[in-house]
Image (tube, rainbow, N blue to C red):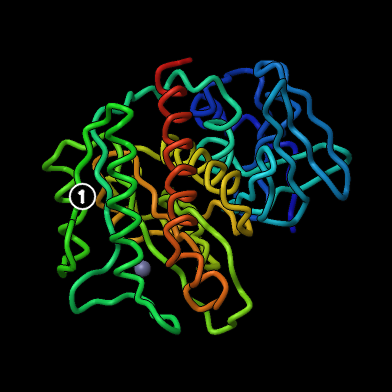
Amino acid sequence: MKLNLGKTSIWVALIAAVSLAGAARLSRICGQTYLELGSVAASLRARTASSGSQILFAKTNRRLSLTPEKKTGFFNNVRLVLNFAPVNRGGRGYVSLLDWNKSLLPLMGDRSDLRRPVGTIVIDAGHGGRDKGASGASSHEKNITLRAAGKLADRLRKFGFRVFLTRSRDTALSLESRPAIAAARRADLFISLHVNSATDRTINGIETFCLTPSGGVSASASKPEYAAYNGNRYDGNNMLLAYRIQEGLLKVSGAEDRGIKRARFAVLRDAKSPAVLIELGFISNRAEERKLNSGVYVDKLVRGIVNGILLYQADMLGK
Ligand SMILES: [Zn+2]
């Protein structure tokens, strides 16, 4: 790992992107631009501390806890997978500028630049028709997502949102047509519901995906990719929405937290609004498959997602 602390002047243009001009200290680490957290703490009224085992960045009710050299951290106790591992150098914590701008500042900042109030929501039940999705011992993903989508739509309507489904029956639908339906409905949010599967049947829990930013590393990849998609216009909102929903789901379900992750799924790439893809649990795990087929448990998950959307809406309204 190479560290150059002297070359800050050439990063003036990037400092502007941090919108904390003058204060931010940037360094080049492992081919990426990194931001020293101490240099932006005061402007956000946050405290920061760093050691070989932990990097903290906190203010009132928001707390970021990272581990040097590890991509997985926590925001308010919700697991978060970063694009690049943070580092500790001489008692100072550094995060990649990409993670700062696209993931951490939307969570830690005042969010006023992200305000896009929500009126219309499109819910996408993953798979359908010939495409069964993942299968467990006694059920298919396509049926679990359809039931959850219907319940989620009903509950969101009770809170006054206009809600549309990409499919309301067991029909096949291409990946491209799903964000296209959301665009035609002028959705302010796109929520895609899926169920996970793994060969290791002990694996269980919930994860929420949002689109990988340009230059970022998807959860399943080892290297950055630089393509930019329509959905990348909402990088900050995508992260805030993913956080609110993952937190909401964890609070009601007691499920394992597999984290907020980044991926370039087709339904997220083409989104014309903030969008997330939720993996509600593992159909390959017997106990979780039973829960995903229980009305009581799905009602809990729906309540968690709605709570998350309501908190996101409060963020959008500046409440
Ligand atoms: Zn799926």
Please identify the quarter of the rendering in which residue 285 is found: bottom right
Choose top left, top right, bottom left or bottom right for residue 127: bottom left
Residue with the mark numbered 1: 165
Q: Taking 151 as reference, is 80 left or right? A: right
Q: Quadrant of residue 206?
A: bottom right
In the foreground, 253 or 248 = 253
Residue depicted at 52% across the width and 62% down the height? 219
Question: Viewed as shown, does residue 225 lie left or right of 12?
Answer: left
Point out residue 215 in the picture as x, y percentages from the top left corner.
Answer: 46, 52
Residue 261 image offset from top left, x and y in percent: 52, 55
| In the depicted structure, whether residue 47 falls above or below residue 287 | above
Ligand 1's image quarter is bottom left
Q: Quadrant of the N terminus?
A: bottom right
Q: Which element carries disc 1, helix, strand or loop? A: strand
Label 1: few (<14), some or many (≥20) within 10 Å? many
Along the viewing direction, whichever of 114 and 79 lies nearer the viewer: 79
Q: Residue 12: image x %, image y %?
A: 55, 27
| Residue 184 appears left or right of 59 | left
Q: Position of residue 228 (x, y in %)?
A: 33, 50
Q: What amino acid does circle 1 point to?
A: Leu
Q: Residue at x 49, y 56 (%)?
A: 297
Q: Nearer the viewer, residue 205 or 242?
A: 205
